[in-house]
Amino acid sequence: MNPNKKKTYTIIALIVVGVMILSPILYMITTAFSTSNTPVTQDENPDIKDEVTNKTALKIIDMHENLDQYKDKEVSMELQFFLTGEEDKFSLGVIDSFNGEEMLFNILAETKDHKIPEGFKNYDKVKVNGTIKELKETHEDHNHNVPLMMVKNIEKIEQEKKDN
């Protein structure tokens, strides 16, 4: 092999190895000084309660965050009825806008006889009263307690039909 070709291949190999070694280092240096890695301030990550305006949604959020204050207390609310897919539980809540998207704010509910009340369908407006209990919800990687309303009374609120 020609000594000049050998020298050329050696230089090319050194350049390739140098780039392979320096690329990750340059990447780490540039990302370290990037503004996207700076800590997020409270103003940039607003509290959900600052964005939600529906008073019922805010009360449901408060029930989740401060369950001890609501536990064993009777509450009456006007909500919407939602089936959960479980045989003995249903959901009560409201739909409100959060960050430009509709979001369901809800609590699980159950009756004394552990049956879903008949005559209700998803989105029905209801007036409900019951006692807030604590339910241990189990997920694959953690457990946490959530509010569960033990419903004493639930009735459908008839919506007025709009005449055109």
Image (spheres, rainbow, N blue to C red):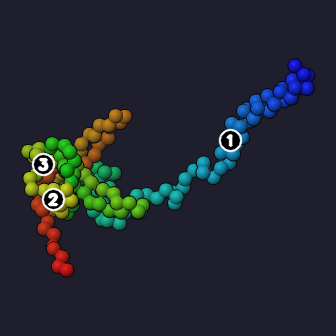
Compared across the picture, whether 44 is left or right of 153 comes to right
Measure the C-alpha gap from mark 2 to mark 1: 58 Å
Mark linked to residue 27: 1
- Where residue 6 appears, x then y in whole percent? 87, 23
Q: Up-down: is 26 above or below 123?
A: above
Q: Is mark 3 on a helix, strand or loop?
A: loop
**Residue at the spot of label 3:** 116
Measure the C-alpha gap from mark 2 to mark 3: 14 Å
Residue type at the position of mark 3: Ile
Q: Earlier in the sequence, mark 3 or mark 1?
A: 1
- The residue under the point 52% across, 58% down is 44
Q: Is mark 1 on a helix, strand or loop?
A: helix
Q: Up-down: is 9 above or below 135?
A: above
- Where residue 63 appears, x then y in whole percent? 29, 53
Q: Do the residues labelled 2 and 3 touch (CB within 8 Å)?
A: no
Mark 2 or 3, which is nearer the eye?
3
**Which corner quadrant holds the C terminus?**
bottom left
Q: Which one is in front, 51 or 82?
A: 82
Residue type at the position of mark 2: Val
Q: Which one is in front, 57 or 102?
A: 102
- Where residue 36 appears, x then y in whole percent? 60, 51
Mark 3 nearby-residue class (10 Å; few <14, some 14–19, many ≥20): some
Q: Which of marks 2 and 1 is nearer the N terminus?
A: 1
**Residue at the spot of label 2:** 128
Q: Which one is in front, 164 or 149?
A: 164
Mark linked to residue 123: none
